[in-house]
Image (cartoon, rainbow, N blue to C red):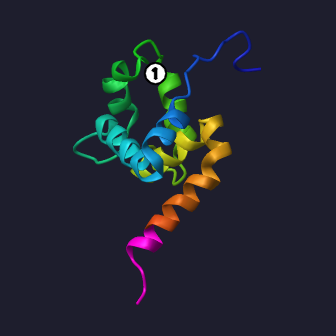
Amino acid sequence: MAGIGKTAPEFEDLLPVMADKLGGEGLMRELSNGFKMLMDKDKGVITVESLKRNAAMLGLQDLRHDELVSMVKEGDTDGDGALNEMEFCVLMFRLSPGLMEESQLLLEEILQDDLNSSAFY
């Protein structure tokens, strides 16, 4: 069995705290900023190489290449070997147990904000 004896790095789940402080729209803006910090500037996506270059910003400088590849594969829903901004945001939500519980409320808040800002008259 792969992975026996290995322990996954522990991460503090700060997304729920950010969501509480920033609201849904602010959280999405911060996730977008995080994506831009990690992406390959020429390709406009997060690649294994761009993640490796920028891993120290996340405290992940000790991760092995195969662990970085796994992180990208985890969120790569279209199979192109990289993360676009939507895949990155979805992955961040999926990896946050606290946000999974709150995601319905955040989605409702964002949708309500959108409805309010584009009222049909």
Given residues 100 and 74, the one toward you in this image is 100
Amino acid at circle 1: His
- The residue under the point 45% across, 65% down is 113
**Residue 34 picture location, percent across and down:** 36, 38
Residue 68 against residue 41 in the figure, above or below: above
Q: Residue furthest left?
A: 42
Q: Quadrant of residue 42?
A: top left
Q: Residue furthest top?
A: 5
- The residue under the point 50% across, 42% down is 19
On the image, numbered disc 1 is attached to which residue?
65
**Residue 105 picture location, percent across and down:** 61, 54
Given residues 18 and 45, the one toward you in this image is 18
Left or right: residue 54 compared with residue 4: left
Q: In the rendered structure, does residue 116 fall within the stretch colored magenta?
A: yes
Residue 84 visible to the viewer: no
Residue 47 visible to the viewer: yes
Q: In the rendered structure, does residue 120 fall within the stretch colored magenta?
A: yes
Residue 51 against residue 74 in the figure, above or below: above
Q: Residue furthest bottom?
A: 121
- The residue under the point 51% across, 50% down is 79
Which residues are drawn in magenta? 114-121
